[in-house]
Each structure stands twice: as structure tokens, then as C-alpha cells.
């Protein structure tokens, strides 16, 4: 699997959390607000806001509601206030708890909504679209940090709820991203569509999106990185992704990233996996429909192994249950190997995918195993371009395949006992 631009091995600094403008007088309920204002009490917008030259609104107080009341916050991109340096966020929650953001539209920023070091907040009923990292909008390639390039981004933020939003055409990183130690979040009942922006500027040159070095077959500046819902981490655990419609995204519909399980050549420290992710009852389709002709890794659901096999491991103990992951360019469900274990892949429909229906990656070498100790039961797969069920480990090792309705499989143990 290719290495992604942001945080697959190395991750950007926390400068992304210091994005707002100078403190102004706090906005009050039903009052007009201006670009860059800090929200410290319940606030309902009375008019549209922007184009803003930098950040939109910054929430700095706990237990407040920011109700856009059907209004729109517009960022600098594509306007005469285009910001040439730094990254702008539409609604930025900074170190807060118990905040609700709802009922409006945010577009033309580097990120539509971002949280840093924030807990137990809710983002609901929002239309978050066309938030694209400014490096992809400029005429010349640059060494662009790409801390953002997302519709909604959570950084070191736990126990939040992202529910009932439309998240479309953001990039080049993701519709929704859970970054660093963002644990116990719920991403539920969202429409996550068309997040397929390439990491290219208008001149067609790759932007250096992230802290990528030249490890892996793609190196830095990877053109196709955009994921619908992205559990990036490292160390993003116990997150729940359920009941979403995820359509026509670029690299993956839902992706759980790998983690550094050894030192790379630069001496990067060992980190921790994005374990115990629940991916349940989502409808995922057409991944890679726009960019798939150039990228065979456009899977519906992917446990990514992004980086050298001696450096990056796959996150463990995913629960992939009851999803419909069909008509994607790559695999319906892909699980990277490298000894990843404890996965439950049950009761999914994975039909008409361009590669395999369910694919467990083979061992990388005698020392680096494939997927082990996992349960793949009661799934339905037909019409795959490759195999309906594929286990890369000879004899399936300790993986259990039972009760699946498959056509073609790559070895007899995938058909299950007695079949």
C-alpha cells in the first residue's frame, strides 16, 4: 500500500491549533458577528459571514451553542481576500467541552470545522463543502504543510459527536479526519460524498501535502489521498463510524491508518495503533469512481498499511459489521497484513467491487505475517473483479471464515468448514 501525505508515519506539529485572529469583544446571542470573533456564549447568526480573510469564528468557552440559523460562513479561497500564508478554518473549537455547532453552511476554508484538544462537543445539521487546502489552489507547487485539507477535522479531541451533516467536495485529505489521540468519537448518519480533490495545484503539479519523506513507492506529494472518513491518529482508538452514506470519495470510503511499530531511518519513535474502531451499517460505494483509473487502492473500507513493512503496522481489532460496501474501484473491504489481528468482519454486503470483495493481505515475508486471528463470518459477496473472498495467508492460519456467501475464493479455507 502507498504512503499517504499526512501523518501516516510522521505527523504535523500542533501549530494547527493556533489559527484564530486576535481576540475581540465576545459575541452575544442574536448579535451580528464578524470574521475572527471569539464565541464565548450562546450565539445565533442573523446573517451570512464572509468572505473572511482568515478564520471564520473561534469558540473558546464551554457549554455554548453556535447556531448558524441557516446562514453561511465563507472563507478566503477564490475571493479578493485570499490568504496566501497559513491555514484558515471556518469554525474552530479550541480546548472546549460541551459545545454544539449546528444548522448552517461552511465553505472555502482549509478546513470547514476543526477541534483541537476538545471533548464532548457536537457538530450537527451542517453543510460543510469545498474546503480545500490553499496549497492546492495556488498556481505554483510549494512546500505546503497541509495540516488541514478536510471538511471536519478533530485533533487530539475525544468523545465528540459528528452527526447528520453533509460533508462534500473537501480535500485533498478527507471529508472527516480523526487525528492524533482522538478517542471515543462518533461519526454517525452523515452524507460524505465527492471528497475526491487531488493534491494538485492548477498547474497540474503535486503539492507537498504533509511531512512526507521519500519512503514507500509513492513518496511525498501523493496525488490521490482523499478519504471520506479517515481515522488517522496515531493512537485514535475506540471510535465509532456508523450509519453514514459514503459515496464517490477518492482513496477510500472509510480508512483506518497504520502506525509506526519500529524506527524509520530518521529515528521516528514507535507510536500506537488506531485500534478498536467500529465501522457499522454504513453504505459505501463508488470509491475511486473519479480517480480510480490511476489508483488501484481505492477501497470501500480499508485498514491501511501505509509505509515500509519494517516501519508501519496495521491497526488491530476493527469491528466491520453490517456495511454495504459495493461498486468500489478496489476491494470492498481491505485489511492490511503485517500481523494485524483480532478483526471481526461480519454480515457485510460487498458486491460488484473492481478487485476483491473481502481481501486479507498476504505476509510480507517469513518474518512479517499477514492478517491473523480474525473472524470473517456471514458476509455476502458477488460479482467481484477478483475473488469474492481472499486470504493471503496459506491455509488461512488462525483466521476463521464461516457462513459466507461467496462465489470465487482464492483457497479452500475461505469457503469455510465443510464447503
Image (tube, rainbow, N blue to C red):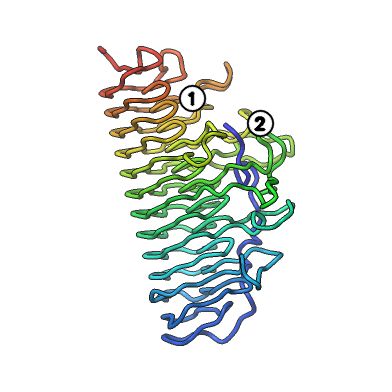
Crowd around label 1: few <14 · some 14–19 · many ≥20 (10 Å)? many
Judging by the rendered image, the residue that carries numbered circle 2 is 217
Q: Which mark is residue 344?
A: none
Mark 1 vs mark 2, foreground winner is 2
What residue appears at the point 32 percent right and 49 percent down from the top-left corner? 243
Which secondary structure, mark 2?
Answer: loop
Front residue (pair 273, 193): 193
Q: Compared to 173, does 122 lie above or below? A: below
Quadrant showing the N terminus: top right
Front residue (pair 29, 269): 29
Position of residue 29 measured from the top left corner of the image (x, y, whole percent): 42, 85
Crowd around label 2: few <14 · some 14–19 · many ≥20 (10 Å)? few
Front residue (pair 380, 326): 326
Badge 1 or badge 2: first in the primary sequence: 2
Q: Residue furthest front?
A: 203
Which secondary structure, mark 1?
Answer: loop
What residue appears at the point 48 percent right and 60 percent down from the top-left corner? 129
Judging by the rendered image, the residue that carries numbered circle 1 is 361
Position of residue 417 measured from the top left corner of the image (x, y, whole percent): 28, 15
Q: Compared to 142, does 355 lie above or below? A: above
Q: Do residues under tags 1 and 2 come within 8 Å of each other at their CB atoms?
A: no
Q: Compared to 362, does 116 lie above or below? A: below
Quadrant showing the C terminus: top left
Horizontally, residue 148 falls left or right of residue 414, namely: right
Horizontally, residue 86 falls left or right of residue 169, namely: right
Position of residue 23 measured from the top left corner of the image (x, y, whole percent): 61, 81
Position of residue 128 measured from the top left corner of the image (x, y, whole percent): 46, 62
The residues bearing labels 1 and 2 have C-alpha atoms spaced at a distance of: 17 Å
Count of labels in the image: 2
Amino acid at each position: 500500500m502507498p504512503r499517504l501525505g499526512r501523518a501516516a508515519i510522521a505527523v504535523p506539529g500542533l501549530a494547527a491549533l493556533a489559527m484564530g485572529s486576535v481576540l475581540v469583544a465576545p459575541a452575544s446571542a442574536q448579535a451580528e458577528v464578524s470574521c475572527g470573533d471569539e464565541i464565548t456564549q450562546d450565539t445565533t447568526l442573523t446573517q451570512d459571514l464572509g468572505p473572511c480573510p482568515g478564520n471564520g469564528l473561534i469558540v473558546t468557552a464551554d457549554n455554548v451553542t453556535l447556531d448558524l440559523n441557516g446562514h453561511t460562513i465563507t472563507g478566503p479561497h477564490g475571493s479578493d481576500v485570499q490568504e496566501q500564508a497559513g491555514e484558515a478554518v471556518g469554525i474552530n473549537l479550541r480546548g472546549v467541552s460541551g459545545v454544539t455547532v449546528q444548522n448552517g453552511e461552511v465553505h472555502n476554508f482549509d478546513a470547514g470545522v476543526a477541534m483541537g484538544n476538545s471533548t464532548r462537543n457536537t457538530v450537527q445539521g451542517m453543510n460543510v463543502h469545498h474546503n480545500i487546502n490553499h496549497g492546492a489552489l495556488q498556481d505554483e507547487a510549494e512546500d505546503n504543510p497541509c495540516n488541514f485539507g478536510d471538511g471536519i477535522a478533530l485533533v487530539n479531541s475525544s468523545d465528540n459527536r459528528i452527526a447528520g451533516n453533509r460533508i462534500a467536495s473537501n480535500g485533498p485529505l478527507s471529508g472527516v479526519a480523526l487525528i492524533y489521540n482522538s478517542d471515543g468519537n462518533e461519526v454517525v448518519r452523515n452524507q460524505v460524498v465527492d471528497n475526491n480533490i487531488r493534491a494538485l495545484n492548477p498547474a497540474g503539479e503535486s503539492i507537498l501535502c504533509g511531512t512526507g519523506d521519500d519512503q514507500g513507492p509513492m513518496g511525498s506529494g501523493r496525488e490521490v489521498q482523499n478519504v471520506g472518513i479517515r481515522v488517522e491518529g496515531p493512537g485514535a482508538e475506540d471510535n465509532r463510524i456508523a450509519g453514514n452514506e459514503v459515496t464517490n470519495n477518492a482513496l477510500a470510503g472509510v480508512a483506518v491508518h497504520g502506525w509506526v511499530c519500529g524506527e524509520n531511518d530518521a529515528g521516528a519513535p514507535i507510536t500506537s495503533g488506531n485500534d478498536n474502531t467500529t465501522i457499522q451499517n454504513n453504505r459505501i460505494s463508488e470509491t475511486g469512481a473519479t480517480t480510480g483509473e490511476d489508483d488501484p487502492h481505492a477501497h470501500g473500507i480499508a485498514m491501511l498499511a501505509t509505509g515500509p513493512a519494517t516501519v508501519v503496522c496495521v491497526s488491530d481489532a476493527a469491528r466491520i459489521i453490517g456495511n454495504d460496501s459495493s461498486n468500489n474501484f478496489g476491494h470492498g473491504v481491505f485489511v492490511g497484513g503485517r500481523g494485524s489481528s483480532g478483526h471481526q468482519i461480519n454480515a457485510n454486503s460487498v458486491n460488484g467491487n473492481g478487485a476483491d470483495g473481502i481481501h486479507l493481505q498476504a505476509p510480507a515475508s517469513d518474518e512479517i505475517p499477514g492478517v491473523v486471528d480474525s473472524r470473517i463470518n456471514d458476509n455476502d459477496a458477488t460479482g467481484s473483479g477478483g475473488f469474492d473472498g481472499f486470504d493471503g495467508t496459506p491455509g488461512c492460519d488462525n483466521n476463521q471464515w464461516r457462513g459466507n456467501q461467496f462465489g470465487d475464493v482464492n483457497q479452500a479455507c475461505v469457503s469455510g468448514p465443510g464447503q
